[in-house]
Amino acid sequence: MSIRLAIPADAKAIGQIRVAAWRSAYQPFMPSEFLASLDPSANLDALTERLTNPTREFMVFVAEDEGNTVGFSIIGAPRYPTQELTVELWALNVSPAHWRQGLGRKLIDRSVAESFNLGFAGIELWCIKGNSPAEAAYAGCGFTLTDKERTSSALTGHPLHEVLYSKIL
């Protein structure tokens, strides 16, 4: 298993992994109609374009197992007000068939290391409140739960409660 910077050819696998991971992990938190409506090919052109030119504001890493892309993480400019020199871990998704094999931790470690190499002082992420496996993974990688929370229904049409984790680099 290896972690590398994503390339445009990874876009389709990233879309498929995102949908499979969300459908498996988020059943208790998101409406089943919303999860069923997820489209693995949504926004692939935009993602392919962004993977062509990774920047400090958007960088994707993929986990490979025997040549197959089985997970990904995204770091980028925070999509909410926060401190200067902070980057956001936008996403961490692993194909459900590859859960509990350490890939999530490897993706987090690479995201953290690259954030440090890019000159960021901290990394933050929003996690669905009550998503115990994710919360344990982030804590195990040195992230600390902050006192910040948010609730929004913009994504799913159903209130989604999130908590903010942070890590000093």
Image (cartoon, rainbow, N blue to C red):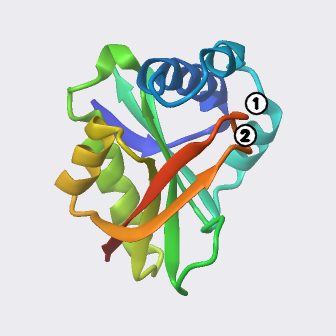
- Please provide percent x and percent y for residue 80: 64, 69
- Taking depth in this image into account, of 152 and 90 the one nearest to the observer is 152
55 relative to 62, above or below: below
At label 1, counting other C-alpha atoms closer than 10 Å, the crowd grade (few under 14, some 14-19, many 20 or more) is some
- Please provide percent x and percent y for residue 19: 58, 21
At label 2, the amino acid type is Leu
* Mark 2 and mark 1: Cα distance apart in space: 5 Å
- Please provide percent x and percent y for residue 52: 71, 47
Q: Quadrant of residue 165?
A: bottom left
**Screen quadrant of the C terminus:** bottom left
| Number of numbered discs | 2
- Please provide percent x and percent y for residue 137: 25, 45
- Taking depth in this image into account, of 4 and 145 the one nearest to the observer is 145
Can see residue 94? Answer: yes
At label 2, counting other C-alpha atoms closer than 10 Å, the crowd grade (few under 14, some 14-19, many 20 or more) is some
- Taking depth in this image into account, of 89 and 152 the one nearest to the observer is 152
At label 1, the amino acid type is Leu
Q: Report the side of 55 relative to 169 (left or right).
A: right
Q: Report the side of 147 relative to 32 (left or right).
A: left
Residue under the image location 45 percent in, 81 percent down: 119
From the image, tell me which residue sits under label 1: 44
Furthest toward the right, the residue is 45
From the image, tell me which residue sits under label 2: 47
**Screen quadrant of the N terminus:** top left
Residue under the image location 29 percent in, 54 percent down: 109
Secondary element at tag 2: helix
- Residue 10 is marked as none
Furthest toward the bottom, the residue is 84
52 relative to 122, above or below: above
Q: Report the side of 138 relative to 43 (left or right).
A: left
Q: Quadrant of residue 2?
A: top left
Asked if disc 2 and disc 1 are in contact, CB closer than 8 Å, the reply is: yes
